[in-house]
Amino acid sequence: MDARPLDDMDRRIMRTLQVSPTLSVADLSEAVGLSQSPCWRRLKRLETEGVIVRRAILFDPKKAGLSVSVLAHIRLRAHDEETLEALERDVCDHPEILECFSMSGESDYVVRVVAASIDDYERFLKKVLLHLPGVASVNSSFTLKSIKATTDLPI
């Protein structure tokens, strides 16, 4: 079954939840100007169709003791399906890796890693990243300052 296109009310619900993901259905329906039952049905449809993947609370990494943020550019030795799938499975097992992107260009993958210190990242690089399936090299770039960090989509 194909997902129904998003309408203005769906987008209003989505924008509201991006800012306040823990709203109750009653509070959400009031915020978007829809009665509770239709709001609940729309919310359930957005979840069922995979538009809403999950709800989250965001933490400040520095205040959580993770002041080092690294973009690690990974190049592989081989590009066969088995190696790619193994690497993609393995990165999901490490909570230090917040994001992983399959790339075009110089790098095969870019992962965003957080660590408490540069020493902690170095240990993670030596013990984990360099041992991921098929890794030939890792080029690490340390972020100096976060200018913009959002999970809000422009909906």
Image (cartoon, rainbow, N blue to C red):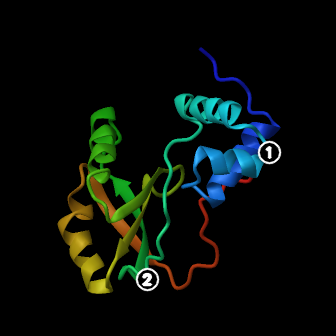
Mark 2 or 1: the one toward you: 1
Answer left or right for 155 relative to 135. Answer: right
Closest to the observer: 59 or 26? Answer: 26
Position of residue 3 in the picture relative to residue 61 (left or right): right
Q: Residue at x 42, y 83 (%)?
A: 63
Please tell me whether mark 1 sits on a helix, a strand or a loop.
Answer: loop
Q: Are marks 2 and 1 in contact (CB under 8 Å)?
A: no
Location of the N terminus by quadrant is top right
Q: Secondary structure at mark 2?
A: loop
Q: Which residue is mark 2?
A: 62
Vertical position of residue 31 compared to residue 142: above or below: above
Label placed on residue 33: 1
Structural distance between the alpha carbons of marks 2 and 1: 37 Å
Residue displayed at 43% across by 82% down = 62
Name the residue: 32% across, 65% down: 96
Q: Earlier in the sequence, mark 2 or mark 1?
A: 1
The residue closer to the viewer here, 87 or 54, is 54
Frontmost residue, 154 versus 75: 154
